[in-house]
Amino acid sequence: MAKAKELLRVQMPSWGIVLIAALPLWLFSFAITFEGFPRPPMPLEVGVGALGLAIVISVVLFVKRWMTLDLLLCSLVPFPLVVTFDEISTAYKTPFVLACALLMTAGAIGYQYYRSARWRGLILLVAVVATLMLAWHSTDRYWKMTGALGFVRCLPDAAGCPPIPPQAPAWWALMFGF
């Protein structure tokens, strides 16, 4: 019984460290939203700056031992999302990426609070798998929507192609709909 209590005992890191450790994930997520079309209404330098800042913060946090290698690797999850969300209109891609970052942040917070290595690893693994599954589901629903709207050889919002019509479903309806 004592062993079971030990497995579920919660470790309380400072909220500042928890939030700072999530910062690289959010900066990487923000940076990848600049890949695509139409470009966000900000200069490309902002996205490159976010990418550079994320790298610097990651290194500093890792060296100070405020971020483990597991957490550092999971903060890189936005990069596979670039491939997953490739060619999707920014109007949908940006909220998809930010929702995935929120899910990963929840997993990272759970990871930082549990002492048991088994539970910590499992929490982080579940967050990564759930994030990727949510991303793939959203992408699949997006492409089904564009097909239903009649986009065949043209990508919505791309140069020379029509924009997504107003009657198209909202991003959250695609992401969380079945």
Image: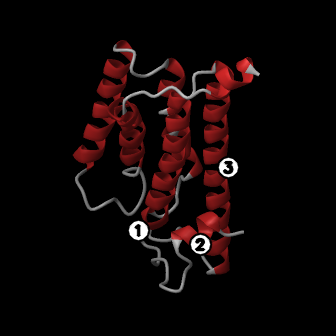
Left or right: 136, with 170 as reference point = right
> Which residue sits at x=61%, y=73%?
146
**Residue 21: numbered disc:** none
**Amino acid found under the numbered disc labelled 1:** Ala
- Residue position for label 2: 173
Name the residue nearer the viewer: 64 or 177.
64
- Residue position for label 3: 133
- Quarter that holds the N terminus: top right
Residue 173 locus on image (x, y percent): 59, 72
- Residue position for label 1: 159
Residue 158 locus on image (x, y percent): 44, 67
Give the mark, 3 or 2, whose residue is nearer the N terminus. Answer: 3
> Which residue sits at x=50%, y=71%?
156
Mark 2–mark 1 distance (CA, rounded to whole Å)? 26 Å
| Residue 24 sits in quarter | top left
> Which residue sits at x=35%, y=13%?
63
Up the image or down, 2 lies above or below 25; here it is above
Q: Name the element at disc 2.
A: helix
Mark 3–mark 2 distance (CA, rounded to whole Å)? 16 Å
